[in-house]
Amino acid sequence: MNKDLEKRTIETCFSPALFPFIQTSENFIVVIVDVLRATTAICTAFENGAIEIVPIAKIKDTLKYKNSGYMIAGERDGIVIEGADFGNSPFNFSKENVKDKKIVITTTNGTQAIEQASISDTVVLGAFANISVLANWLYKQNKNVVIFCSGWKNKFNLEDTIMAGALSELLITKGFSTCFDSTYAAIDLWNIAKPNVLAYIEKASHRHRLKKIGLDDVLEYCFTQNTTNVIPFLRKHTLINILKN
Ligand code: MLT
């Protein structure tokens, strides 16, 4: 293997609050992860033919797009925001709803993390839904990887961490390395979860939050690998599917 490729590292950032303290300082790609549900939903939207998706942190900035040719997707604490066409369930982003459409989206954590990371050179989105195409694409870039878990309101969460572990495991088999405790911890948790991910995720607080509001029908889908062949890529504050463009 090429020496430069061998040196590429993977750092995991467990929450937006920790992002200012990442240690990877140059030549890196940020992978935003929000398995339940933002990054899974966005992958699904592209898989079903959405043209572009504008991720926005604030509700009021999102609603400005109303009546300007965009569909509005938005939630806070899982609940659909007033004025939106729909919330953040991947099932909302069906072909019927999104094919050839432009969408703006605001979510509790995922779109905040995207905005925070947007100062970085390269930002892409990851979920179990696109894990293999993403790992293959990352392998082809000559860059380090920072996996940015969106968490929950600046706190650590299990679902994004196990996805970080699963992605790191794949990247390490391709020749990446890591010297970061956070990545080792994510891989360890993934190894505990892997034999029965849905049983493991019963421990996750957002799993129970979604259940309480009757929105946990997405669980199996969100933890199924490779349901999409897309890589949402941030270009000038708009997400496009880089595998298509
Ligand atoms: C988020 O961005 O925090 C999530 O996607 C919340 C959700 O809709 O479940």
Image: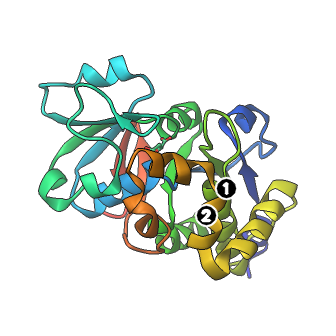
Residue 115 visible in the current orientation? yes
Q: Quadrant of the N terminus?
A: bottom right
Count residues near mark 1 (Cα–Cα under 10 Å), then give few for <14, some for 14-19, many for 20+: many
| Display colour scheme | rainbow
91 in relation to 209, above or below: below
* Cα distance between the residues tagged 1 and 2: 7 Å
Residue 180 visible in the current orientation? no
Which residue is depicted at the point 53% across and 37% down? 109
Residue 45 position within the rendered picture, expressed as x and y whole percent measured from the top left: 29, 55
Residue indicated by mark 1: 158
Check disc 2 and give the amino acid type: Ile
Q: Quadrant of the C terminus?
A: bottom left
> From the viewer's perspective, is 199 left or right of 8?
left
**Mark 1 vs 2: CB contact within 8 A:** yes
Which residue is depicted at the point 68% across and 72% down? 193
Which residue is depicted at the point 65% across and 68% down? 200
In the image, which is nearer the foreground, mark 1 or mark 2?
2
Residue 57 position within the rendered picture, expressed as x and y whole percent measured from the top left: 45, 27
Residue 50 position within the rendered picture, expressed as x and y whole percent measured from the top left: 23, 52
When asked about the image quadrant of residue 11, the answer is bottom right
Is label 1 in a helix, a strand or a loop? helix
First in sequence: mark 1 or mark 2?
Answer: 1
15 in relation to 27, above or below: above
Q: Residue furthest front?
A: 212
| The residue at label 1 has a CB less than 8 Å from ligand 1 | no
> From the viewer's perspective, is 93 left or right of 238?
left
Residue 145 position within the rendered picture, expressed as x and y whole percent measured from the top left: 67, 56
Check disc 1 and give the amino acid type: Leu
Residue indicated by mark 2: 201
Looking at the image, which is closer to me, 196 or 208? Answer: 208
